[in-house]
Image: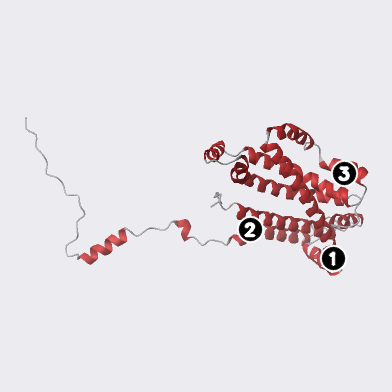
Amino acid sequence: MSISHAPPTDISPKTPPGADSAGTGSAAALELEPIAASSSRRTRVPRWLRRTSGPVALLALWQVLSATGVLTSSVLASPGRVSQVARDLIADGTLPTAMGVSLQRVALGLLFGTLIGTALALASGLFHVGEDLVDASVQMLRTVPFVGLIPLFIIWFGIGETPKIAVITLGVTFPLYLNVYAGIRSVDSQLIEAGESLGLSRWGLIRHVVLPGALPGAMTGLRYSLGIAWLALVFAEQINADSGLGFVMVQARDFLRTDVIVVCLVVYAFLGLIADFIVRTLERLLLQWRPTFTGR
């Protein structure tokens, strides 16, 4: 039996008759030209515009509800009325003075809470003895609502500034402790072994491996602590206060001034937003070595 072999078929691209080398080169160039994705050809909306669209839409809805009478002034003042009251409070110095007092309280409480929470977390996270002595007590105390301790603080410290700062300090301490402690204990053990193999001392491991590894958790804890600091300030300033944003809100409540209350709430929101922006900027500066997913 004989087996016939078919001649090989030429599958190479044929150049059309009469096409010169220049035409062939341009055709190859056209074939190799990259095609842009449809998403990259779309007109991209600036990010600042996307981020402000939500608050602007909420403000427009608020104005529409006030103009149509759905929201009466006794329930919630209109945006125009709120802006007018804000200008009046700024003009007579009431709002700047109250903001200065409140910022001072938050700054002191945040400073003391950061120092205490970080020190406890370092002692508990770096040393087994510190964990045995500190962690159980902190875990027990953090379950106690710090707002419920206000009457006790008033008995201990009186009705001055000390109980207000103590409440903020207590609210800041625990979230910072938990995040710093978790950041220390989440450092990869292989990094510790690598540092030991390079001859790093115990302090060198803490300085060059453990603390940088715990820094992301510490920054997250600081952001949580800032939010709780403003919450604690609201409670602290509404009890036996004679100055600050909370005191202005209490006076407005007694006179049913919803416009003044909304002004103070907006100020609280903007101060918290500015503080969070500062922490996020600090986070980007300190964590440049740590590339992360930033969204698409």
What mark, if any, has residue 161 been given in the picture? none
Residue 82 coordinates in the image, percent (x, y): 80, 63
Nearer mark to the viewer, of 3 and 1:
3
Q: Earlier in the sequence, mark 2 or mark 1?
A: 2
Number of numbered discs present?
Answer: 3
Q: CA distance from mark 2 to mark 1?
A: 28 Å
Q: Position of residue 103 (x, y in %)?
A: 80, 57
Can you identify the residue that label 2 sits on? 51
Q: Which residue is mark 1?
A: 89
- Give the image location of residue 255, x and y in percent: 91, 57
Percent coordinates x, y for residue 238 in the rendering: 87, 51
Residue 42 visible, this orientation: yes
Q: Nearer the viewer, residue 278 or 137?
A: 137
State how the image is colored: secondary structure
In the picture, measured across the screen, residue 10 lies left or right of residue 137, that is left
Q: Does 30 sit above or below residue 171?
A: below
Indicate which disc residue 150 carries. 3
